[in-house]
Amino acid sequence: MEVIKISEKHRDFFSMVYAVVQQVPEGRVTSYGAIAKYLGMARSSRMVGWAMNAAHHQPFYVPAHRVVNREGLLTGTHHFGSAHRMAELLSNEGVRICNDQVENFNSLFWDPASNLALD
DNA sequence: ACGTTGACCTATA
DNA sequence: GTATAGGCCAACG
């Protein structure tokens, strides 16, 4: 087991990412870019993925399986322990997965910018 | 300290 | 429609 250390500076950013991911309803999915854009880091969407990497080490639950890339492709399946873990979780929520690809992704897509109010 | 990598996205051809 | 290039910024060797 490796422990991923999170810099104090980015603790906030990570927390914000987790907060958004936790708002994603069951049976719905969102993308890294949408989260990054919502947090004002549209050009640093890779950091969202890095935050997901550390999500497993967080004390609270983070439904990282509901976060996919902009094509609706499950790119992070290898980081879920088993390759089919992510697809299983999504399938359990009613999301049809075919070859690591979310079906009807356009309808299942949940955009935080359109569902969360910006204060 | 430098180069490479990465759960990505946008732009251009 | 696919293919290639560039950018982004933190973590790792």
Image: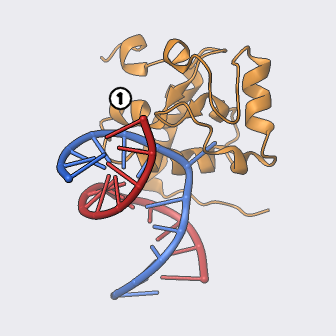
Chain colours: A orange, B blue, C red
Q: Residue A74, position in %: x, y? A: 62, 38
The quadrant holding residue A56 is top right
Say above or below: A47 vs A99. Answer: below
Residue A62 shows in the view: no
Q: Which residue is mark 1?
A: A38
Closer to the camera in the image, A20 or A59 = A20
**Amino acid type of disc 1?**
Tyr
Q: Residue A46, position in %: x, y? A: 44, 50
Check disc 1 and report its element: helix, strand or loop.
helix
Q: Residue A47, position in %: x, y? A: 45, 50
Chain hosting mark 1: A
Q: Residue at x 59, y 60 (%)?
A: A5
Q: Residue at x 59, y 17 (%)?
A: A28
Q: Is residue A51 left or right of residue A80?
A: left
Residue A39 shows in the view: yes
Q: Residues within 10 Å of mark 1 (few under 14, many from 20)?
A: some
Disc count in the image?
1
Closer to the camera in the image, A71 or A31 = A71
Say above or below: A23 vs A100. Answer: above
Q: Residue at x 80, y 19 (%)?
A: A92
Q: Quadrant of the N terminus of chain A?
A: bottom right
Q: Residue at x 79, y 49 (%)?
A: A81
Q: Is residue A41 left or right of residue B7?
A: left
Q: Is residue A95 left or right of residue A9?
A: right
Q: Quadrant of the C terminus of chain A?
A: top left
The quadrant holding residue B10 is top left
Q: Residue A39, position in %: x, y? A: 35, 34
Closer to the camera in the image, A95 or A4 = A95
